[in-house]
Image (spheres, rainbow, N blue to C red):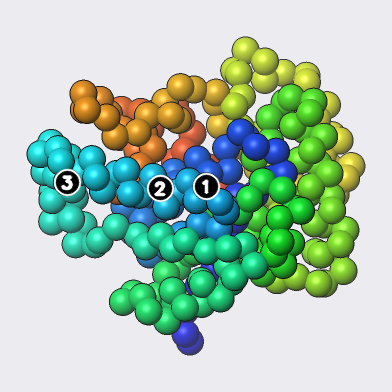
Amino acid sequence: MEKETLFIAFSTQKGGVGKTAFTVLMSSYLHYVKGLEIAVVDCDYPQHSIFEMRQRDMEQVMKDNYYKQMAYKQFTALKRKAYMIEKSLPNDAITTAENLIEQAANQPDIIFFDLPGTLNSKGVVKTLAGMDFIFSPVSADRVVMESTLKFATMLNENLISVGKSDIKGLYLIWNMVDGREKNELYKVYENVIGELGLNILKTFVPDSKRFRRELNTVHKPVFRSTLFPSHKSLLKGSNLDALAAEILQIIKQ
């Protein structure tokens, strides 16, 4: 049986909640650590943040012998190149992904899509309807929560429950969690989420400055990169490994 490539998006209507960060972190962890074939379609027009990050990462590696050596050691150990990142407009994202599958030397197990943070952008709803799974980051902030619940409920009522999409699952993810606050407030929110017929993952992602750690000139451990996985010293306590395990269990990879 021919392998199916899964289409997955970390998507939400609210900016700054972590959809692009999750896309990069999960792509790099699954590709470089777990050995899955990953590709990314960056259709977050016009900024194309992930494509731009790859450009920055490549420039840093080419001009810095420390990172050049890291990249060589990684390639030698894993025998695999960096995952592909293709730019696209939201309206053309599915076609871009299909072309990517045809051109890939190894068929991707997963293609992640990074979409604009608004359903009003042309083609966003159409592309979301073509996803197999959608994971929506949310924080215990009233504005973020209301926006995300509105977004998830719209998808659930207008696409998923009426069979007008390929979506097999829609899940919320607790992000930017302050451990001191993970208490009754979260239980109240989780009850509301359940009453709306929505699902939220068990794994929560803590609020931490490590999520902004990219390649740097002083060679501090890197957390977010398109060329390297999160450094082991920063992975501990991030719950990224637990999040990946829970997502893989859901999508059966």
**Circle 1 residues within 10 Å: few <14, some 14–19, many ≥20:** few
x and y percentages locating residue 92 in the rendered image: 59, 70
Can I make out residue 249 in this image? Answer: no
Q: Position of residue 108 (x, y in %)?
A: 42, 70
Crowd tier of the residue under label 2, counting other residues whose Cα lies within 10 Å: few below 14, some 14–19, many 20 or above: some
Frontmost of labels 3 and 1 is 1
Contact check, label 1 and label 2, Cβ < 8 Å: yes
Answer with mark 3 or mark 1, whichever residue precedes in sequence.
1
Residue tagged 3? 62
Q: Tell me which amino acid carries mark 1.
A: Gln
Are dots 2 and 3 in contact, CB under 8 Å?
no
Left or right placement of residue 156 versus residue 249 in this view: right
Q: Which of 48 and 126 is in front in this view?
A: 48
Residue 109 placement: quadrant: bottom left
Image-based side of 198 in relation to 77, left or right: right
Residue 136 lies, with reference to residue 218, above or below; the image says: below
Residue underneath mark 2: 52
Whole-percent x, y for residue 151 in the image:
79, 47
- According to the picture, the residue beneath numbered tag 1 turns out to be 47
The amino acid sitting under disc 3 is: Met
Whole-number angstrom distance, CA of label 2 to CA of label 3: 15 Å
Which residue is the extreme one toward the bottom?
1
Give the mark, 2 or 3, whose residue is nearer the N terminus: 2
- Numbered badge on residue 240: none
